[in-house]
Image: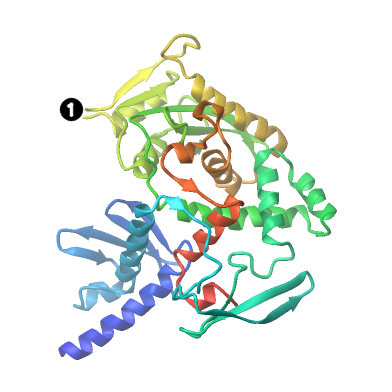
Amino acid sequence: MDTQHTLQLLEVRRMKGEQIAAVVGSVERVDANSYRVHSQSSEMWYGVRHNLRGWSCDCPDFTHRDLGACKHTFAVELSVAIRDRVEQSRVIEPLDVQSCLFCYSNNVVRHGVRHNQNGDIQRFSCKDCGKRFTRNIGFERLKATPQLVTSSLQLYFSGESLRGTQKFLAMQGVKVSPQTVHNWITKYVGLMEKYLEQITPKVSDSWRADELYLKVKGDMKYLFAMMDNDTRYWIAQQVADHKGVSDVRPLLHEAQEVAGKKPATFITDGAPNFHQAYNKEYRTRYSDSTTHIAHIRLQGDMNNNRMERMNGELRDREKVMRSLKSENSPILKGLQIFHNHFRPHMGLDGKTPGEAAGITIEGDNKWITLIQNAVRVPHLTEGDVSR
């Protein structure tokens, strides 16, 4: 195979890799050196790993063709580049409505109005790159405005029920069902989660873990949560069947992946499964290994009161939810995002845990800022911005 033909094949794979990376959820990070990539033509997932020789994939194209890359490795490389770019800037700013969303030129003019039953949407055109777009990024084809959608998210995660949120929208002249509100939660929590997982929070070396009960389809379950001691940042979560015997190693492993490190001190309430998971995930034979502080006291310096205060937030919210539909409900991740980035904490002088951990979301409406950045950063094609 000649060099020119090889370069052409690699360019085709690079373009297909960009298409894969542009689909939310198609590239999943397993650990620092491993990813899962969804196939474009089937329901299969392929494993992509990094070693001393570079990226490798277990797909047939990489295995049987000596090209050194495939569309799945290109998709991972693009995702890693996006992750690095996001990590470099921990200040999440509102999108600049004065410049082109593609080439960032200021040579932008109005280009007609799109009419729909809920109002008019101004369209814009860039004289430099020729692209057309709207400013309604992330909220296309919705009956409600971005302001009403994000107000609904704020209401729900602040403690309102789905039906109460629906009544609020009805007062604003937008008639939707409680299921529609739940669909918004599912959609936007998924977007924000995928975006925020690319940013490593600056948490301390002291972490706390605890559990609280909740109902899933009417059955009793337990939500295990890991929180940073200094910033109150909710690092990881896991739903399990039992309180003291369920394997909580996934919780500790996820927390290490999110923070990019192990804690120096791990504080729990003394449940045996925490110590078993600690022995497997955090304990090493070296002198700088994690110290596990297990206790059940409510008084004194070594207590878990900070964790209990966060649990109080969740218990109050769980009363309104009554019961979750599934263990992987987006509502749980939404509560984690709300706690970290939207709820000011008195113990942090009015900052959110995210701000204390070095992640600042700016703008008058932080929901819109985060959602539009979540849509804009991974997607670089016109079809993902305006349709």
Q: Quadrant of the N terminus?
A: bottom left
Question: Residue 245 lies in what quarter of the image?
Answer: top left
Instruction: Answer above or below: position of 87 versus 117.
Output: above
Instruction: Answer above or below: position of 302 versus 355.
Output: above
Residue ID at (69%, 39%):
321
Instruction: Between residue 159 and residue 67, name the one nearer to us.
Output: 159
Q: Looking at the picture, which amino acid does disc 1 mark?
A: Arg
Residue ID at (65%, 42%):
157
Question: Residue 58 lies in what quarter of the image?
Answer: bottom left
Instruction: Between residue 243 and residue 54, name the one nearer to us.
Output: 54
Residue 291 % position (x, y): 29, 22
Residue 107 % position (x, y): 50, 79
Residue 111 % position (x, y): 63, 83
Q: Please indicate, yes or no, whether residue 153 appears anywhere in the rendered image.
A: yes
Residue 222 % position (x, y): 55, 32
Across the whole image, how many numbered discs are drawn on residues? 1
Instruction: Between residue 356 and residue 194, name the one nearer to us.
Output: 356
Q: Is residue 314 toward the left or the right of residue 23 in the image?
A: right
Q: Is residue 272 toward the left or the right of residue 262 in the image?
A: right
Instruction: Answer above or below: position of 37 versus 311.
Output: below
Q: Is residue 339 toward the left or the right of residue 54 in the image?
A: right
Q: Which residue is mark 1?
A: 285
Residue ID at (38%, 77%):
16
